[in-house]
Image (cartoon, rainbow, N blue to C red):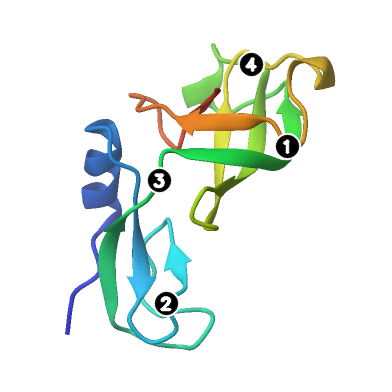
Amino acid sequence: MPTAPTIKEMTARRKDGALTGMRCAGCKKTWVTPVARCAACAGTSFETVTLPNDGTVLTFTIQNVAAEEFMNEVPYAWAVIRLSDGTNVTGWIPYVASERDLAIGDRVRYSPSYKPGVMFEKA
């Protein structure tokens, strides 16, 4: 049975430029953060997959107050992105100060960052 990657392993892959996820061997649902059990089918067998780097903004909110790691980044958008393979992922988009700077449906691409989380930039 394949073992799931740890948060540390997935974070290291993101810093190296690869957006990776875990695909459930049973139902094929993809998760971007490590899980011990698939929330869709309760499966426990996963494979590591490389995800596409491009997607579309499904929804977002502007963050003006942030955790310490992001204090110098505010304002920014926290968004739900649908990757080109259909996988949904949450992440942040810098340099978004208002709703005029980003729109639902905008194309974005994954950008490796030393900051935590998954960062996207407008494409």
Residue 63: quarter of image: top right
The residue at which mark 2 appears reads as 28
Which residue type does callout 3 highlight?
Pro
Residue extending furthest toward the right: 99
The residue sitting at 27% across, 33% down in the picture is 17
Which of pointers 3 and 4 lies earlier in the amino acid sequence?
3
Other residues around mark 3 within 10 Å, as few (<14) / some (14–19) / many (≥20): some
Give the distance between the C-alpha atoms of the residues marked 2 and 3, in whole angstroms: 16 Å
Give the distance between the C-alpha atoms of the residues marked 3 and 1, in whole angstroms: 17 Å
The residue at which mark 4 appears reads as 74
The residue at which mark 3 appears reads as 52
Which residue type does callout 4 highlight?
Val
Give the distance between the C-alpha atoms of the residues marked 4 and 2, in whole angstroms: 36 Å
Q: Indicate the quadrant containing the C terminus: top left, top right, bottom left or bottom right.
A: top right
Front position in the image: 8 or 123: 123
Q: CB of mark 2 within 8 Å of CB of mark 3?
A: no
Taking 13 as reference, is 21 above or below it?
Answer: below
Taking 49 as reference, is 63 above or below it?
Answer: above
Give the distance between the C-alpha atoms of the residues marked 3 and 4, in whole angstroms: 27 Å
- Which of discs 4 and 2 lies nearer the camera? The answer is 2
Secondary structure at badge 2 equals loop
- Which of discs 3 and 4 lies nearer the camera? The answer is 3
Front position in the image: 110 or 118: 110
Which of pointers 3 and 1 lies earlier in the amino acid sequence?
3
Secondary structure at badge 4 equals loop
Name the spot of residue 61 as percent of width and height, x first.
Answer: 76, 34
Q: Is residue 58 left or right of residue 34?
A: right
